[in-house]
Image (tube, rainbow, N blue to C red):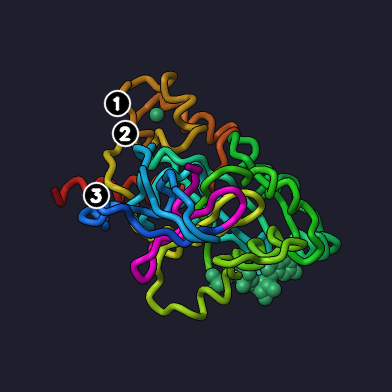
């Protein structure tokens, strides 16, 4: 028996990645009734019968499961944004960071189009780049060019043996990144480029794809504009630079809005917290409060 990860269920079969290849699997009789219980990302044990064919014999308990997209055992979210053309939408970035953090998934920020950005820089330089702002907060940040390949290897090293979801706005370079990470490797059965996948299905099935020694899901649904169900105190917990200073606020129930002696507002005034982050926090706070009232 060999261990693998379920990539997708399709047409009555299950495609499992194990030992560096994709196996077309059917279910053992006892699993058939609870067919719908299988999710991409599930860790399974398979028994090969013929070449590339096998049966699923066992399923491991899940560590976590996302509802949208529906994937089990997600380790990390790769949030892809272009440094330039288009300029990164920081509101969306902070929203995704809140969603991911709330789901207890590690965020990784990948900024693309480094080649274009460096060209732009020749006309004038900024003091603290957006990338530095997020690095300073403590996030893992990569700067890459999908065109020249610069920085790609470092991103790939972080994907190995992990299940990652890919999210970010249209035009950010998600497909290009996926392709850049997959170069030099001939695609095997069950592996297709992100773009050809997208072109093929109008209704998007969630599925995992083999990429840089790990598994990656393209997740359009993850850029949802609504914040997850949370209360006003939980929101600040999703901003690491707020959470870290919260105990210094005068009131333990401080939501860092109108309260006096707020450590977060002090840090904002000192320039230790980026104004865009605080601005977005306030926008999200209003949304969370409005949602609280609805229930
Ligand atoms: N110069 C440069 N162009 C890039 C880079 N990455 C992507 N592009 C270009 O940016 C455009 C959008 O890239 P895609 O990879 O299609 O973006 P996407 O995020 O998959 O977009 P959607 O499919 O709409 O979600 C394409 O024209 C790419 O060639 C990069 O690092 N440098
Ligand atoms: Zn406060």
State ligand 1's quadrant. bottom right
Apparent side of residue 204 relative to residue 174 in the rendered image (left or right): left
The disc, 3 or 1, on the residue closer to the chain's N-terminal end is 3
Q: Which residue bears the numbered disc 2?
A: 233
- Helix, strand or loop status at disc 3: helix
Give the CA distance from mark 3 to mark 1.
51 Å
Q: Secondary structure at mark 2?
A: helix
The answer to whether 147 is drawn above or below residue 285 in the figure is below
Does the beta carbon at disc 2 come under 8 Å from ligand 2? no
For the stretch drawn in magenta, the main secondary structure is: strand
Residue 172: horizontal and vertical position, in percent? 60, 65
Report the residue at 37% width, 27% height from top.
260
Which residue occupies the extreme right position in the image? 122
Label 1 residue near ligand 2, CB within 8 Å: no
Image quadrant where residue 180 sits:
bottom right
Task: Mark yes or no: residue 240 visible.
Answer: yes
Quick one: 111 or 160, which is closer to the camera?
160
Q: Nearer the viewer, mark 1 or mark 2?
A: 2
> Residue beneath label 3, please?
30
Judging by the rendered image, the residue that carries numbered circle 1 is: 253
Q: Is mark 3 within 8 Å of ligand 1?
A: no
Q: CA distance from mark 2 to mark 3?
A: 45 Å
Q: Is residue 17 magenta?
A: yes
Q: Residue at x 52, y 73 (%)?
A: 197
Location of residue 201 by image quarter: bottom left
Viewer-nearest of discs 2 and 3: 3
Task: Provide the residue span drawn in magenta.
Answer: 1-21
Q: CA distance from mark 1 to mark 2?
A: 7 Å
């Amino acid at each position: 028996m060999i261990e693998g990860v379920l990539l997708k269920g399709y047409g009555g079969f299950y495609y499992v990645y194990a030992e560096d290849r994709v196996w077309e699997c059917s279910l053992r009789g006892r699993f058939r009734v609870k067919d719908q219980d299988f999710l991409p990302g599930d860790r399974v044990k398979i028994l090969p019968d013929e070449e590339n064919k096998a049966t699923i014999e066992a399923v491991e308990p899940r560590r976590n499961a996302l509802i949208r997209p529906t994937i089990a055992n997600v380790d990390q979210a790769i949030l892809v944004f272009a440094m330039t053309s288009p300029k990164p939408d920081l509101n969306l970035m902070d929203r995704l960071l809140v969603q991911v953090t709330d789901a207890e998934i590690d965020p990784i920020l990948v900024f693309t189009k480094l080649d274009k950005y460096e060209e732009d820089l020749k006309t004038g330089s900024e003091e603290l780049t957006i990338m530095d702002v997020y690095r300073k907060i403590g996030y893992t940040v990569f700067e890459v060019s999908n065109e020249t390949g610069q920085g790609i290897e470092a991103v790939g090293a972080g994907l190995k043996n992990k299940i990652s979801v890919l999210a970010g706005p249209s035009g950010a370079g998600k497909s290009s990144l996926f392709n850049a990470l997959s170069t030099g490797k001939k695609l095997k059965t069950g592996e297709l480029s992100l773009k050809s996948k997208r072109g093929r299905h109008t209704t998007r099935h969630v599925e995992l794809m083999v990429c840089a020694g790990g598994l990656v899901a393209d997740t359009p649904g993850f850029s949802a504009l609504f914040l997850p169900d949370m209360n006003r105190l939980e929101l600040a917990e999703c901003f690491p630079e707020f959470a870290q200073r919260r105990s210094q606020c005068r009131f333990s129930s401080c939501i860092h809005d109108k309260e006096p002696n707020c450590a977060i507002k002090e840090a904002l005034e000192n320039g230790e917290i980026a104004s865009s982050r605080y601005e977005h926090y306030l926008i999200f706070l209003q949304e969370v409060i409005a949602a609280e009232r609805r229930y």
